[in-house]
Amino acid sequence: MAGLKEDPILGIDGITIKEELEIGKPEIDKSREDHPVLETGGAVIKGESLINNRSVIDKVREEGSCGQVERDMGPPTSNSIHRSGSRPQLDLSKAAIEGTFEERDPTILLPNQSDDISHLALDIGGSLIKLVYFSRHQDRPTTDKRKKTVKERFGISNGNRRSYPILGGRLHFVKFETSKINECLDFISSKQLHCGGMDSHSWHSETSSNGNAVIKATGGGAYKFADLFKERLGVSLDKEDEMDCLVAGANFLLKAIRHEAFTHMEGQKEFVQIDQNDLFPYLLVNIGSGVSMIKVDGDGKFERVSGTNVGGGTYWGLGRLLTKCKSFDELLELSQRGDNRTIDMLVGDIYGGMDYSKIGLSASTIASSFGKTISEKKELTDYRPEDISLSLLRMISYNIGQISYLNALRFGLKRIFFGGFFIRGHAYTMDTISFAVHFWSKGEAQAMFLRHEGFLGVLGAFMSYEKHGLDDLMISWMEKFVQKGTEITAPVPMAPPGTTGLGGFEVPSSKGGTLRSDASALNVGVLHLVPTLEVFPQLADPKMYEPNTIDLSDHNELEYWFTVLSEHLSDLVDKAVASEGGTDDAKRRGDAFARAFSAHLARLMEEPAAYGKLGLANLLELREECLREFQFVDVYRSIKQRENEASLAVLPGLLAELDSMTEASPFFLFLIGIKSFNSETRLLTLIEGVLAANIFDWGSRACVELYHKGTIIEIYRMSRNKMQRPWRVDDFDVFKERMLGSGDKKPRPHKRALLFVDNSGADVVLGMLPLARELLQRGTEVVLVANSLPALNDVTAMELPDIVAEAAKHCDILRRAAEAGGLLVDAMINTSDGSKENSSSVPLMVVENGCGSPCIDLRQVSSELAAAAKDADLIILEGMGRALHTNFNARFKCEALKLAMVKNQRLAEKLIKGNIYDCVCRYEPAS
Ligand SMILES: CC(C)(COP(=O)(O)O)[C@@H](O)C(=O)NCCC(=O)O
Ligand SMILES: [Mn+2]
């Protein structure tokens, strides 16, 4: 049994596991056909060892192998978040795939789905109607035991703000052609959007003096179609000024959405971080049918300084006449394949192929748009519509770029933001405008674009409900990918980056073969309202903080993770469907989830920045969001329960063995020449325990394969045995010195430790709880930080109090601390010794982190975590998602310990130049 060391905790001396868990060989010895657990040699430390406890083993075996896929899952127990409480029911009746099933990204219509819809606003323009509505989820049930005490302890108050549930609402974006206004009216009517906001949870509804509902609307159509809305829906349109709305919408987006603004040069999209305090003044160029240029000096402070009548309407109008195209998007699509040299007169045409270098014009610069057509005896039909479209597009884009720059120059404005539906996320258009601004400003000014480009006005109209409390909406929004309702759940692919070549006045060196087939659709996900989220106060430098360790802008990396997630999909769908009882409805939802998620992945492969800057954490969160979208509330619920129970059953034995390590006499220590042998060994054993138990990760393909080969405890033991130092990243000695000191120096214990826990079962029960207990014993307050919503097999904050209560039944340290932390307020705990004394203890608390993903973005955490973090002097981040995929490079104001087992070969190679199942123990003193 090469390399297997004696394990004091588990007493595996003599165990007959023949192979270790090795690099590239993640297998338990196949020769251990049955009852391998019983082959252990015997107890080695003080009495009966945990693993020799027959009844425990039998119990674990009864729980079954953790690889078993459930088919028989009943309704959630008290440990789970109730489905009906945490999310509204999705009404899938009459759900239909629009278009053919062969279509790559079919739209899924859910005509009868309705959330608690609160507000609707409209922007009815000359060509398009833009619609924004907000849907809010019902409050979660108030069975969250820890909530009240956490609020009291950390003094969290919402002030006068309403209290919203976490992840509690969504802003949806929809558009219709104005010529098809009846479709828009049908949509509003089918989703009852005009009747929203009437219940007790919502903001005050608007009603006109005659009792009719009122909808905020902007754009000329708000006047033109007012009677139609009254007639069809019985609603009045409350008209808001178009410019006011544009500015309010742009300000909202630039302040509230992190990855809203971006530059686009030579096919490269780059997001720009906007400092809210340094936003004004700027020039807003809204390119609709015509173009408005607005100097914005603040909220509600602006002046329309210029404009041009040569805008989107001009491109579309002239384009339609000249090419016979049937739609704007078709015209745009044509331009992708065009060559403007056949139409435009270039400098080289005038200078016999030469540059006019004296004034800096290259031969390929356009001297005169459409100029070539005057000198040739050709008819319109002699020109390719593709070339005409491209020449037109470049003519208009350059013109707008140039006038914009001149106006920015006129008022000394450094930033120019371009919006309006003319752009439509079209790479070529953006490159052309960027080139013009760059060219004329000699590189001094930069054009920026907005992801919600077409929705500025309607967002502004939406914001104008402000007097009814919507000013709160500015607080925090997150982009969350998923489109819903009757919208597209399966977004469409985009052109790959780098489609436009040089752009500008030059002949493009390459042109995209494909325009996004939904060029007219949104380049946005749904915005989620999360007003309770805050920046984690212990981040050393929030502005520089980047949660993702793996940057998916490297296409190979993106491809790898795309493949990994795609390969997981069918197994995940099976589990998801089973978790909802395997009903026909669940199967249908499973199918819809698979389609939607695959479509999102496909889109991201083609346009990685489609939903903002893309990192691995976003991909993993997208999957969880998508599951929730299809009402899969907690896919791993019964796996989690089973693993919790199995682990809790062996916890008392583990704690007893840990305690047995405290009792060496000073004489013995003197004898072996070590000052604190036992505390050292115990600390090491505890950290090893955390790393070993982190193997229970249902998101890792390698681990899931492993689970089919043994029971929970077998796998735990095997993983525990593998723990050999030095780990691949091993700062244990530094951490140990901080905890235990060296020489005679006794360090002060930490005041408060935040333990970001990861997985259910052994991970939290046998790994993190014993570590928490150690800290508590040392007089450190412990806050267990867990997910607000389920993600894979991660333990949630709602589930933890019951787990702690169960553990506390067998451990007075945990019991007293949990009582002090208010975790056991209403629990009837029978301690092992029957004592009911309530001696003082530092508290053990649980707070939710504000997210529902295996990773954590510390720019957006729950207010209770932010409050708890203020007094913390130690942060322990556990698991691959929280400590490696995200936050591996994060620096904190206080001490930080990052603990994880790497359960993915590629990540191990890339991040730590190691192998799968290597471990990371990274300790960082306060920055
Ligand atoms: C999703 C996870 C980050 C969860 O890991 P954990 O945080 O539980 O340690 C991890 O399972 C993961 O990175 N999986 C990648 C897919 C795979 O290796 O199969
Ligand atoms: Mn996890």
Image (cartoon, grey):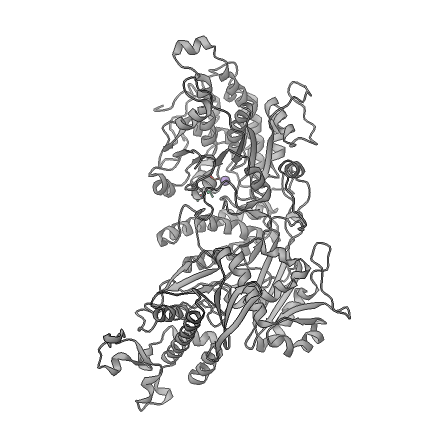
- Residue at 36% over, 74% down: 337
Looking at the image, which is closer to me, 644 or 667?
667
- Residue at 43% over, 50% down: 615
Number of labels in the image equals 0
Q: Is residue 207 above or below residue 659?
A: below
Q: Position of residue 618 (x, y in %)?
A: 47, 50
The quarter of the picture showing ligand 1: top left
Q: Position of residue 822 (x, y in %)?
A: 65, 32
* Quarter of the figure with the C terminus: top left
> In the image, 199: left or right of 525?
right
Q: Is residue 124 above or below residue 162?
A: below
Q: Quadrant of residue 402?
A: bottom left
> In the image, 762: left or right of 203?
left
Q: Position of residue 601 (x, y in %)?
A: 45, 56
* Quarter of the figure with the N terminus: top left
- Outermost residue on the bottom side: it is 377
- Outermost residue on the right side: it is 210
Looking at the image, which is closer to me, 449 or 763?
449
Is residue 310 something that shows in the picture?
Answer: yes
Q: Position of residue 121 (x, y in %)?
A: 63, 66
- Residue at 50% over, 74% down: 305
Q: Is residue 119 above or below residue 403?
A: above
Is residue 650 something that shows in the picture?
Answer: no
Q: Quadrant of residue 669?
A: top left
- Residue at 61% over, 42% down: 73
